[in-house]
Image: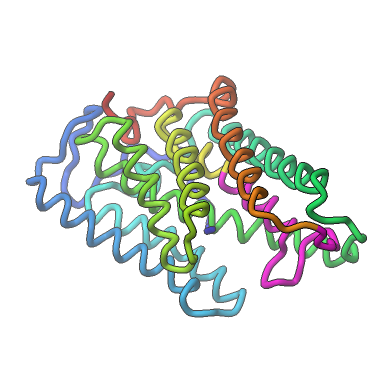
């Protein structure tokens, strides 16, 4: 899976080609031109973001590349008519921090619960913990790297696409399209089995729902971030291991169904979480028709 501070609340930003301010209004340019610019911009950002996935780089270079994605996305968004980062879902609206924190705690907790269930089913035994110093480094590394990874992914595959396409497509179509984009985008660097396709599809659906229901990316980023941090604390980076020293006891095909079941449960629980989140009060560039 796949992250710069964002300025204080951002007003609706002008784009290279004016975008009407009314919610759901369509850009004045022809649709074919709009889609062409959107596609070129997407390709530029996607290739940039996947460089570390196809060409191994040092951790410092990785962090610099991912942090550099934000000003690049801001510029590409304005040139293609999507607007800057604020218009693509990173505006600091009322309750943005609450959405981010709730999303993080929600998915981190359910991901930890998945690992507890796998332990209870006898898939591994706990043989100890890594040294405290190593754990501290791993926690800090996970928090920073996984935030950058999650946020960049959400800006590209959800904020950018939804900002461009929401005047033309209903929310259901945007959820389906961004979910498909999320799955396909992993073909760059992951060997996908059908279980992996289904797992990524459930995740992409969850992230997309969080976006269209709140009108900004903060809840989606929080969910994405929390799940990724919990994963890294369990698995670690580059086969170095996570917080626990584990011994493998059981490997079976049915365990994939357990993991998929927990992911589906997380998606279902999202509808309860939405009752406690805050919807962006901005005139909704990320609010689709329907």
Q: Residue at x 51, y 40 (%)?
A: 220
Q: Residue at x 74, y 56 (%)?
A: 234
Number of marks in picture: 0
Q: Position of residue 69 (x, y in %)?
A: 43, 62
Nearer to us in this view, 76 or 155: 155
Quadrant in the rendering for residue 80: bottom left
249 left or right of 22 in image: right
Residue 239 among magenta residues: yes
215 left or right of 165 in image: right
Nearer to us in this view, 248 or 39: 248
114 left or right of 155 in image: right
Residue 200 among magenta residues: no
Which quarter shows the N terminus?
A: bottom right
Return the residue found at the far left: 30
Q: Position of residue 265 (x, y in %)?
A: 60, 33
Quadrant in the rendering for residue 95: top right
Return the residue found at the far top: 275
Q: Position of residue 145 (x, y in %)?
A: 61, 61
Check the image and report above or below for 120 versus 182: above
Q: Which residues are magenta?
A: 224-249
Check the image and report above or below for 64 versus 85: below
66 left or right of 259 in image: left
Q: Residue at x 32, y 31 (%)?
A: 172
Q: Residue at x 37, y 58 (%)?
A: 73
Nearer to us in this view, 110 or 67: 110
Q: Position of residue 118 (x, y in %)?
A: 76, 47
């Amino acid at each position: 899976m796949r992250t710069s501070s964002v300025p204080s609340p951002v007003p609706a930003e002008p784009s290279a080609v004016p975008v009407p301010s009314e919610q759901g209004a369509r850009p004045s340019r022809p649709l074919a031109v709009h889609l062409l610019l959107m596609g070129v911009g997407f390709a530029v950002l996607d290739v940039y973001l996947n460089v570390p996935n196809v060409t191994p780089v040092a951790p410092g270079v990785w962090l610099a590349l991912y942090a550099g994605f934000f000003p690049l996305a801001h510029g590409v968004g304005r040139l293609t008519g999507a607007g800057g980062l604020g218009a693509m879902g990173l505006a600091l609206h009322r309750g943005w921090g609450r959405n981010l924190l709730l999303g993080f705690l929600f998915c981190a907790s359910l991901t930890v619960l998945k690992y507890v269930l796998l332990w209870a089913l006898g898939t591994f035994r706990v043989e100890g913990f890594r040294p405290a110093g190593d754990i501290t480094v791993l926690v800090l590394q996970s928090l920073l790297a996984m935030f950058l990874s999650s946020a960049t992914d959400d800006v590209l595959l959800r904020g950018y696409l939804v900002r461009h396409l929401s005047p033309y497509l209903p929310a259901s179509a945007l959820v389906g399209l961004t979910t498909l984009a999320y799955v396909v985008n992993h073909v760059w660097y992951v060997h996908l089995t059908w279980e992996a396709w289904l797992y990524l599809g459930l995740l992409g659906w969850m992230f997309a729902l969080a976006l269209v229901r709140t009108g900004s990316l903060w809840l989606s980023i929080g969910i994405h971030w929390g799940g990724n941090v919990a994963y890294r604390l369990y698995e670690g980076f580059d086969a170095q291991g996570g917080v626990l020293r584990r011994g493998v006891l059981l490997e079976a095909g049915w365990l994939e169904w357990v993991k998929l079941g927990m992911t589906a449960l997380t998606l279902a629980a999202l509808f309860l979480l939405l009752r406690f989140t805050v919807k962006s009060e901005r005139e909704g560039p990320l609010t689709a028709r329907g």
